[in-house]
Image (cartoon, rainbow, N blue to C red):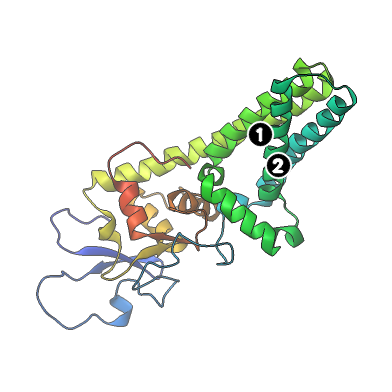
Amino acid sequence: PKWPKSSRQGLAIGRGQLVSRPPESGPGPQAAPDAMALRGDFQGGSAGGGQGLGLGGPDDGGNIAIEKLLKWNWAFFGGSLIVFATAVGTGIHWMGHPTFAPGTFFSEFFLLVFGAIMIILDTPIPHMTNHLHIKAARFHIYKFALFMTRFMGRGVWYLFLATMVFGVLWDTGINAILGGFFTLYLVILGIVAMGKGLLMTHKLGRVREAITGAGYSADHYLSRNQTGLSKDQFKVMVASATNEPDLFTMDEIDYVINALAFGPHNDGHVTLEELRYWLSPGPPLMV
């Protein structure tokens, strides 16, 4: 449904449908619970205070959405193993054939560090993923490398690592066959991840254009004192703005919310501040 721009009624989301909010001017009795905009005790919404929405720590139970689907997790983990194994194998080779090559030394060192970081981030083994120290390390890595939580960021990163793997295996002549195979895998992984990110970025841009083109702001979709939208509420907002209820799958909604978040973790909510930033003028948000 569409509302005229001149209407002074707000738009709120509740129980999977859109509910118009009474005008804010003038005193009056409160609306009945079923007619109210979404409150803090319903669908995980928050009626006050923004703590914990989008900014979390390693033990806050937050979710990093890029790790959600197992197929992506294993694909990224395979890439991290390739990078780490390449660094270890070529390092052993150079220890057996010592030579003065500072450039090669630093390339090997950083490739080893990058491979270890990616294994920490992408390991799909639950016992390792839930280990306290691993969770803390992942949180701090994401905190200072937030692009790792985006498909676009991961895609560019693996393309960069592909060039390093190619250099240490193919260019040096250590093993051209493995160099070609490993590089091909990382390049395909990077391109596919970037393609996924570009597709979702384009769709999210369409939603933003629809909302801003209608003259609405982020506050239009929240009730009074509400600080954010849950996954279901965000999906309903997308459907109301574009008239395409299936524009995003629920997994893609996770990825979008993750991209909107100001921090590396989120609990499935988009805060009002994050919505306002997304709808403000500027380049499209990369997913």
Which residue has dot 1 on it?
189
Secondary structure under tag 1 reads helix
Disc 2 marks a residue whose amino acid type is Ala
Q: Is residue 260 above or below residue 54?
A: above
Q: Position of residue 108 (x, y in %)?
A: 73, 29
Count the labels in the image.
Answer: 2
The one nearer the camera, 137 or 234, is 137
Mark 2 Cα-neighbour bin, 10 Å: few <14, some 14–19, many ≥20: some
Secondary structure under tag 2 reads helix
Residue situated furthest front in the rendering:
100
Q: Is residue 197 above or below residue 149?
A: above
Q: Earlier in the sequence, mark 1 or mark 2?
A: 2
Residue situated furthest left in the rendering:
26
Q: Is residue 240 visible?
A: no
Q: Quadrant of the N terminus?
A: bottom left
Q: Residue at x 55, y 41 (%)?
A: 151
| Residue 181, image quadrant | top right
Q: Is residue 189 visible?
A: yes
Q: Residue at x 86, y 28 (%)?
A: 95
Disc 1 marks a residue whose amino acid type is Leu
Q: CA distance from mark 1 to mark 2?
A: 7 Å
Q: Position of residue 64 (x, y in %)?
A: 57, 55
Mark 1 Cα-neighbour bin, 10 Å: few <14, some 14–19, many ≥20: many
Please say if the residues under marks 1 and 2 sit with CB atoms less than 8 Å apart: yes
| Residue 90, image quadrant | top right
| Residue 206, image quadrant | top left
Which residue has dot 2 on it?
75
Q: Position of residue 263 (x, y in %)?
A: 47, 54
* Left/right of residue 7 with respect to residue 237 in the rendered view: left
Q: Residue at x 36, y 54 (%)?
A: 274
